[in-house]
Image (cartoon, rainbow, N blue to C red):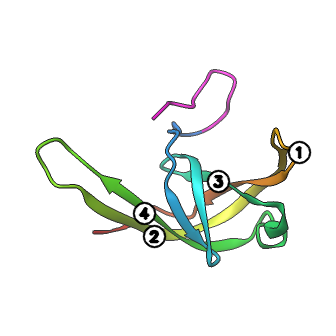
Amino acid sequence: MKNCLNQNERRFSRRLELHLPILILNLKVESKNISSTGVYFETTIDNSPLFQPGKKVNLKIVANTSLSMLPSKTVKLTGNGEIIRNTILSDSHHAKKLGIALRFEKKLEILV
């Protein structure tokens, strides 16, 4: 887990590099980073019509917790958000992906 905040950014909250499974619009994706106010993830370029800025979506994030001396537990976070940005990305194999920034509309609900 790495802190993604630097002095040149204008983000309102600290982001953590956490790779968590997300279910959004019946697609399974993985977060690249997350904060208390939003999440960033990538998907295939084919899904770009689904993730246009301004679109409101429901999402579910699954996190597995593990503390020493305690059994691991799966925690589900659910809520709503708004797509605020999508960016076309290229990887080293010249495949194109879509980077999505989503802002949570309110605090996520925790389901244990």
Determine the main secondary structure of the stretch shown in magenta. Answer: loop
Instruction: Check disc 1 and report its element: helix, strand or loop.
Output: loop
Where is residue 110 drawn, in percent x and y?
34, 66
- In the rendered image, residue 54 lying in the magenta stretch gets the answer no
* Residue labelled with disc 2: 78
Residue 86 seen by the camera: no
In three-dimensional space, the C-alpha distance between marks 3 and 4, rounded to whole angstroms, equals 14 Å
Q: Pick the residue in front: 30 or 84.
A: 30
Specify few, some or many for label 2: CA neighbours under 10 Å numbering under 14, 14-19, or 20 or more.
some
The quadrant in which the N terminus is found is top left
Foreground mark, 3 or 2?
3
The residue to which callout 1 is attached is: 94
Q: What's under tag 2, amino acid-wise?
A: Thr
Query: Which span of residues is magenta-colored?
Result: 1-11
Q: Which mark is residue 62?
A: 4
| Contact check, label 1 and label 2, Cβ < 8 Å | no
Callout 3 amino acid: Phe
Q: 90 and 93: which one is in front?
A: 93
Disc 2 + disc 4, Cβ < 8 Å: no
Q: Earlier in the sequence, mark 1 or mark 2?
A: 2
Residue 41's label in the rendered image is 3
Q: Residue furthest right?
A: 94
- Residue drawn at point x = 34 percent, y = 56 percent: 64
Q: Position of residue 88 (x, y in %)?
A: 85, 51
Residue 83 x, y percent position in the rendering: 71, 62
Give the residue type at disc 1. His
Cα–Cα span, label 2 and label 4: 9 Å
**What type is the residue that disc 4 sits on?**
Val
